């Protein structure tokens, strides 16, 4: 769902999609992005609950970004759609009981630095970075034999 959320938010920010400051409807956004309308509606609801998009009710209602894509780190979207970012459930104060070896696990707590590094890397990427032009891949040159 995070992938769809990123695409939906990029669609809300797309220049020329609608006049600046106006809202977009879920059906309009679905048509523009190619994502099924029920999925767009579900994504927009979750993004609204997280404060990433704002909704406006009524006949002329719809959705708009709460702030520019450049001010939205990828971590906020991931957390809004999928919950806390962690490789394992037993770290960062996670609720116990997810593993039968938890009480004597030698790895318990050792994943914390890994999770912190992943969160830090994802926080450094804004949605504007993802929505921008695609960087051309750098060709890999094989070493001389």
Image (spheres, helix red, strand yellow):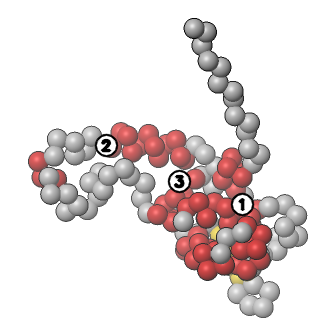
**Vertical relation: 123 (above or below) 51:** above
Disc 3 secondary structure class: helix
Task: Answer with mark 3 or mark 1, whichever residue precedes in sequence.
Answer: 1
Q: Are marks 2 and 3 in contact (CB under 8 Å)?
A: no
Question: How much space separates mark 2 and mark 3, taking CA atoms?
Answer: 18 Å
Nearest to the observer: residue 29 or residue 103: 29
Name which quarter of the figure residue 54 lies in.
bottom right
Q: Which mark is residue 50?
A: none
Disc 2 secondary structure class: loop
**Does residue 32 appear in the picture of this structure?**
yes
**Vertical relation: 57 (above or below) 44:** below
Q: Which residue position is annotated with label 3?
A: 75
Task: Answer with mark 2 or mark 3, whichever residue precedes in sequence.
Answer: 3
Residue 19 drawn at (x, y percent): 88, 70
Residue 4 drawn at (x, y percent): 61, 64
* Residue at (73% x, 80% y) in the render: 27
Q: Which residue position is annotated with label 1?
A: 10
Q: Dot 1 surroundings within 10 Å: few (below 14), some, or many (20 or more)? A: many
Q: Which residue position is annotated with label 2?
A: 111
Question: How much space separates mark 3 and mark 1, taking CA atoms?
Answer: 15 Å
């Amino acid at each position: 769902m995070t992938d769809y959320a990123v695409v939906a938010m990029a669609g809300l920010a797309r220049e020329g999609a609608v006049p600046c400051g106006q809202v977009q409807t879920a059906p309009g956004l679905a048509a523009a992005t190619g994502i099924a309308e029920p999925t767009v509606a579900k994504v927009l609801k979750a993004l609204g609950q997280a404060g990433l998009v704002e909704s406006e009710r009524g006949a002329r209602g719809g959705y708009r970004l709460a702030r520019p894509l450049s001010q939205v780190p990828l971590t906020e979207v991931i957390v809004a759609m999928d919950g806390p970012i962690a490789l394992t459930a037993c770290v960062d104060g996670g609720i116990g009981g997810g593993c039968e070896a938890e009480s004597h696990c030698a790895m318990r707590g050792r994943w914390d630095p890994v999770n912190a590094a992943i969160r830090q890397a994802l926080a450094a990427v804004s949605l504007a970075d993802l929505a921008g032009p695609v960087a051309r891949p750098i060709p890999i040159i094989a070493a001389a034999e």
